[in-house]
Image (cartoon, helix red, strand yellow):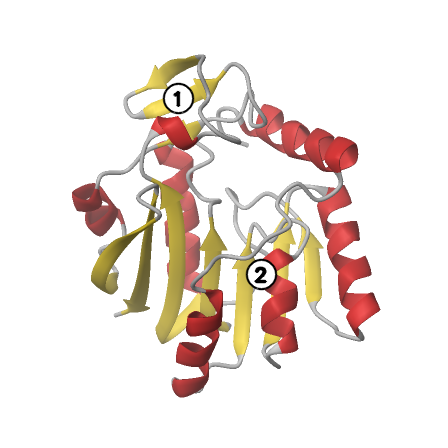
Amino acid sequence: MGFGEEMNDSQWEKMYQEEGDPYDYTHEFIGDLAEKFKERGIKRILDLGSGAGRHLVFLAKECFEMSGIDSSQTAVKINREKLESEGLEADLKVGDIYEKLPYPDDFFDAIVSIQVIHHSTISNIRVVIKELERILRPGGLIFITIPKSKKTMGFGETKKFNEIEPNTFMPLDGNEKGVPHYYFEEETLREEFSAFKIGEIWLDNGERFCFIGELK
């Protein structure tokens, strides 16, 4: 377990226990993404850091074979309840995304990870990226979003934080207090995801980097 991970996992669990489903909305691009996946013949998708299922349930309704992994048992429980209420199924797991993922090589056609992978140090994030490369089939797609600046930590602007490593900040207040946040520049995003062919990297509401990558 890497730096900050014990605090990271317990903070997410506490948040879901206290607030239920604080992220009960879907990314504005998810519908277009589903259509793109269908055009590419994608069937099997992993939602990495699936939380309470806001995107996983949407994609399951679109008839994709969904898997999800999250560190919070409570979030996964809420996700299962949502699926059951819709008469849907998915493979859900509780686990640390910054360690070896519990899936075989070349298993998924696509992976989505929305506002998730930046919640750690760069050394742990590199572990995640290597695992994405391992479990995604050649030619498979990823859709990643991450915040552009430390002003988007938690809900609204977090006013207190410490820089614990270069480009890595620990909020001292707000909804994500105690969770490390690493911030990329567009150039470093392309460098760290060099195993993927990436076209445009765009901004969602001026706050979040978004991109689709194809595994080379």
Left or right of 63, for residue 142? left
Left or right of 55, for residue 91? right
Single out the residue that lies furthest toward the left. 187
Q: Residue at x 46, y 64 (%)?
A: 111
Left or right of 48, for residue 118? left
Q: Is residue 124 above or below residue 158?
A: below
Q: Residue at x 23, y 63 (%)?
A: 198
In the picture, the quarter occupied by the N terminus is top right
Residue 103 is drawn in which quadrant?
bottom right
Residue highlighted by disc 1 = 169
Q: Is residue 39 above or below residue 80?
A: below
Regarding mark 1 in the picture, which secondary structure is present there? Answer: strand
Q: Identify the mark nearer the N-term, 1 or 2.
A: 2
**Residue 106 visible to an observer of this rendering:** no
Q: Which mark is residue 55?
A: 2
Say which amino acid is labelled 2: His
- Rate crowding at label 2 as few (under 14), some (14 to 19) or many (20 or more) other CA atoms within 10 Å: many
- Mark 1 or 2, closer to the camera: 2
Residue 112 in the image: state x and y as whole percent: 47, 61
Q: How many marks?
A: 2
Q: Nearer the viewer, residue 127 or 179?
A: 179
Q: CA distance from mark 1 to mark 2?
A: 26 Å
Say which amino acid is labelled 1: Phe
The answer to whether the residue labelled 1 contacts the one labelled 2, judged by CB atoms less than 8 Å apart, is: no
Left or right of 48, for residue 191? left
